[in-house]
Structures are given as structure tokens and as C-alpha cells.
Image: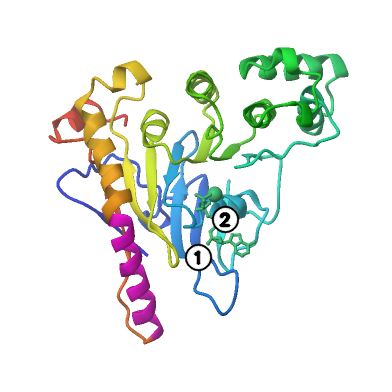
């Protein structure tokens, strides 16, 4: 897959983070494909991207295009049919505490209380800490997700949203090198989601946490992400567009809605989901057909800056 930077809004300073740009990212995905059955087309193929240290990437795409599968391959929990994932220069060959995962459905140990689920994970990460220090740390993160009072409850005694929050607290507590999150806030009410999003932003700012997060919520993506990967529909899905978020990084839920860039980015994302994701799928399918007949045409990932009506702000704010 080639990477095409679309004029007129491209910036030479903007993060590209692709192997083809010659720059090796902290997390590098190269030519990833997944075919579950030999008699069916691949769910996705030719997936290339890089994520820099401290970068926050959101992935948006229609149901079934392979987002969770890509995340599971990155976590080392699933094998790809082709391609490789590298983190910190090493190939990902299995699960590791360096990659914390929040699953689409919670994955708690059912026989342990909420607190002990965190204690279990923290003990693997911090084998030298005594029980008191570990329980204190677990309590801090359970408080963060508003579950201090439910610490002794087992998963079966918690609601769906509460279980999801324990999973989020566990991933944050372990402070992995990379956080992989699969629609982590989908089951939460708007108020709790807002509180945890703010907390996530704070943690990322403080710790330079690198995050890859799947979401269906375009506003969440605009609030949190430095770049938003738009996946075409499956089969033959791939990352069709990389949207660079040009809103100031200091944005909050309140400030971003007063910035005209927000509406331009939002419209661009929605337009992709409604119109272009299907067209991109047809293109990819055609490309697969041409390739099997020997043609060398290539699918392009577009890097776009829909927030910028006028390239001027780039000169003023090169830190995006
Ligand atoms: N274990 C499996 N065996 C066979 N097919 C699978 C398996 N897991 C996923 N698939 C198929 O792969 C495709 C992608 O699934 P995946 O869960 O990655 O999609 P997704 O983009 O995360 O969707 P959603 O937004 O609904 O969570 C789907 O068509 C699904 O049916
Ligand atoms: Mg999924």
C-alpha cells in the first residue's frame, strides 16, 4: 500500500509515522492481513501503519471490518494470515504486560473481586511491591473509575458498565508501554464516559502513554486522538484514510465545540462512514482482483487534514 498525502492541506512537519516514509515508529504494522477461512476472502489485507511513542490513535470503521481482529493481533492474542507487528523494534509474538488491553467485552477473572482483579495484574507487573502498596494502588485506580465502594464485589455482582470500568482501571493501573482499547467506553453512561475520557487524557499527558483505541463515537475520537484511522468496509478492508487532528492538543470537550475545525473534522469522518467507506471497499476489492491477474496498481492510504480550511494555522502551530 502506498501513502498519498493530499494537497492542499498537507504539512511537511505533520506526523507521517509510516515505514515507507523511512521513519520507524514505536509501533509498526506491516502488510497485515487476516483470512479466517480459505474459501472466504480476507477480512482485511495490506494494512500498514505506524504509531509514535506518546501518540493517541483512534480507529473508526463499520462493524465487521476487522478492527478488533487487528487489535488482537497487535496484542499478540491472535495470529495474522500475513504481515507483522513490531513494538519498540521487536516483533510481537505473543501477549505481554507491555501491552495493556481493554476488551470490547470485559475480561475479568470471575472468581476474584474487582480489587483483586487489579491486584492480580499489578502483582505481575510489580513483583517487588508488598500487598499494602499493591492494594493502595488498586484502590487509586478503582476510585478513578468511580468504583471505590464496589472493590470487594465479584464481576457477577457488577453491572455491565461497572465490569467494563474495572477492566479500564486494570489496564491503566498496569501502566503498559502501549494501551490497546476496544470500544472501552461503549457500555458507559455519558457522564461516566466523560469523567473517564478526561482521566485518560490526563494520564496520557502525564505519562506520554501510547494508545490505540477503537471507537464508534466520532466526537470521542476528535477529543482524544492525534490521528484517526478510517477503515474501509470488509472484506478486503484496510486503512483507507488517516485523518490528522489539527485541533490544539490542549482541547477539552467544552473548548473544541467552539472551534470551527471541529465541525470540519466531524463532517469529514461522518461522510467517510456514510459514503466513502463502501467505495473504498470496492476499490480494494478491485485492486485484489487486479493483483491476482498480475497488475501492479496500488491502494493508497490518504493522509488528510480536514480541520484546516486555511493552511495558515500550521505555520503558527507546528507542534500538531
Ligand atoms: N474467530 C473467528 N472466526 C471466523 N470469523 C471471525 C472470527 N472472529 C471474527 N471473525 C469475522 O471477522 C470479521 C471482523 O471481525 P471483528 O470482530 O474484527 O470486526 P470489528 O470491526 O471489530 O466489528 P465490531 O465493530 O462489530 O466490533 C467479521 O466478519 C467476523 O465475522
Ligand atoms: Mg470489534
When the figure is inspected, residue 32 is found, relative to residue 215, above or below; the finding is below
Relative to 141, is 42 above or below? below
Q: Residue at x 16, y 50 (%)?
A: 7
Front residue of this view, candidates 312 and 198: 198
Residue 252 visible (yes or no)? no
Task: Determine if the C-beta at disc 1 is less than 8 A from ligand 1.
Answer: yes
* Circle 2 crowding by C-alpha within 10 Å: few under 14, some 14–19, many from 20: some
Residue 130: x, y in percent?
A: 87, 19
Judging by the rendered image, the residue that carries numbered circle 2 is 69
Type of colouring: rainbow
Location of residue 234 with respect to 142 vertically, above or below: below
Residue segment shown in magenta:
276-292
Find residue 203 and report its image quarter. Answer: top right
Indicate whether 182 appears above or below 122.
below
User: Which numbered marker is on residue 43?
Assistant: 1
Q: Position of residue 240 (x, y in %)?
A: 34, 56
Magenta: main secondary structure equals helix
Which residue is pictured at 43% across the width and 56% down the height? 19
What kind of element bears circle 2?
A: helix
**Residue drawn 67% across and 38% down?**
106
Find out if the beta carbon at label 2 lies less than 8 Å from the nearest ligand 1 atom: yes
Amino acid at each position: 500500500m502506498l501513502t498519498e498525502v493530499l494537497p492542499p492541506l498537507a504539512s511537511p512537519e505533520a506526523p507521517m509515522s509510516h515505514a515507507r516514509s523511512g521513519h520507524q515508529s514505536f509501533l509498526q504494522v506491516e502488510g497485515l492481513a487476516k483470512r479466517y477461512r480459505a474459501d472466504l476472502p480476507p477480512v482485511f489485507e495490506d494494512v500498514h501503519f505506524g504509531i509514535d511513542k506518546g501518540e493517541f490513535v483512534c480507529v473508526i470503521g463499520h462493524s465487521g471490518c476487522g478492527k478488533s481482529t487487528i487489535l488482537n493481533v497487535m496484542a499478540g492474542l491472535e495470529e495474522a494470515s500475513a504481515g507483522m507487528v513490531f513494538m519498540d523494534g521487536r516483533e510481537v509474538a505473543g501477549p505481554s504486560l507491555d501491552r495493556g488491553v481493554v476488551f470490547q467485552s470485559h475480561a475479568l477473572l470471575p472468581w476474584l473481586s474487582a480489587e483483586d482483579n487489579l491486584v492480580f495484574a499489578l502483582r505481575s507487573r510489580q513483583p517487588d511491591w508488598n500487598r499494602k502498596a499493591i492494594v493502595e494502588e488498586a484502590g487509586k485506580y478503582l476510585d478513578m473509575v468511580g468504583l471505590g465502594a464496589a472493590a470487594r464485589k465479584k464481576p457477577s455482582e457488577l453491572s455491565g458498565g461497572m465490569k467494563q470500568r474495572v477492566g479500564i482501571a486494570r489496564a491503566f493501573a498496569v501502566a503498559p508501554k502501549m494501551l490497546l482499547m476496544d470500544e472501552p467506553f461503549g457500555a458507559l453512561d455519558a457522564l461516566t464516559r466523560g469523567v473517564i475520557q478526561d482521566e485518560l487524557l490526563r494520564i496520557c499527558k502525564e505519562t506520554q502513554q501510547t494508545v490505540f483505541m477503537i471507537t464508534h463515537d466520532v466526537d470521542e475520537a476528535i477529543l482524544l486522538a492525534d490521528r484517526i484511522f478510517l477503515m474501509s468496509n470488509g472484506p478486503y478492508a484496510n486503512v483507507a484514510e488517516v485523518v490528522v487532528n489539527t485541533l490544539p492538543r490542549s482541547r477539552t470537550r467544552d473548548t473544541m465545540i467552539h472551534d470551527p475545525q471541529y465541525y470540519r473534522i466531524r463532517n469529514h469522518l461522518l461522510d467517510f462512514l456514510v459514503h466513502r467507506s463502501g467505495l473504498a471497499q470496492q476499490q480494494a476489492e478491485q485492486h485484489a482482483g487486479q493483483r491476482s491477474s498480475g497488475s501492479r496498481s496500488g491502494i493508497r492510504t490518504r493522509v488528510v487534514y480536514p480541520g484546516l480550511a486555511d493552511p495558515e494555522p500550521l505555520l503558527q502551530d507546528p507542534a500538531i
